Image: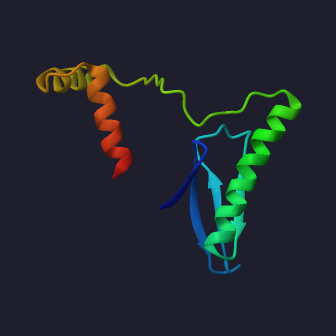
Amino acid sequence: MSSMNYKGYTARVEFSEDDGVFWGKVLGLPASTSISFEGETVDQLRQDFHNAVDFYIADCAKTGKETLKPASGKLMLRVAPEVHSAALIAAQANGMSLNQWAAKVLQSAASA
C-alpha cells in the first residue's frame, strides 16, 4: 500500500488502470466521513489530497463541527481471557507494562 500524509491525515493511494488516474482515500475516519481525491499525475494527486483535507477542515469550521482526527491515542480492546493472560506474561517477560508491550507490538504490526 502506498500512502500520503498531510496535516495529520493519512491516505491510502492506488492507481486505477481502467481510468488512468491515481486515487486516494483518507484512512482512520468514521464510516460516515469520507475524504477522497484523485489525479492523473503524482503532483495532481498530492494537490487534490491537500485541497480535500483543507476543504474538510474549512467546512467543519464553517458548520461548527469538530474536525475528526484519525486517532486519539486511546485504544480499548476486548480479547479472550487467555489472550489477555498470554499478553501480560509476554509483557512482564520483556520487562514492560502491558500497555508498553501492546504499543510496541501494534507499532511493529502496523509498520509491516
- The total number of labels drawn is 0
Name the spot of residue 68 as percent of width and height, x first.
67, 33
Name the spot of residue 106 as percent of width and height, x first.
35, 37
Task: Tell me where residue 87 sits by quadrant.
Answer: top left
Left or right: 34 in relation to 101: right
Left or right: 5 in relation to 53: left
Judging depth in this view, the residue of 14 and 84 nearest the camera is 14
Left or right: 2 in relation to 82: right
Residue in the picture at 69% in, 54% down: 50
Indicate whether 20 appears above or below 100: below
Name the spot of residue 30 as percent of width and height, x first.
66, 37
Looking at the image, what colour scheme do you see?
rainbow
Indicate whether 36 appears above or below 78: below
Task: Tell me where residue 46 sits by quadrant.
Answer: bottom right
Judging depth in this view, the residue of 109 and 61 nearest the camera is 61
Name of the residue lying farthest toward the left: 93
Task: Tell me where residue 92 sits by quadrant.
Answer: top left
Indicate whether 106 appears above or below 36: above
Residue in the picture at 29% in, 36% down: 105
Name the spot of residue 42 as percent of width and height, x first.
61, 71
Name of the residue lying farthest toward the right: 63
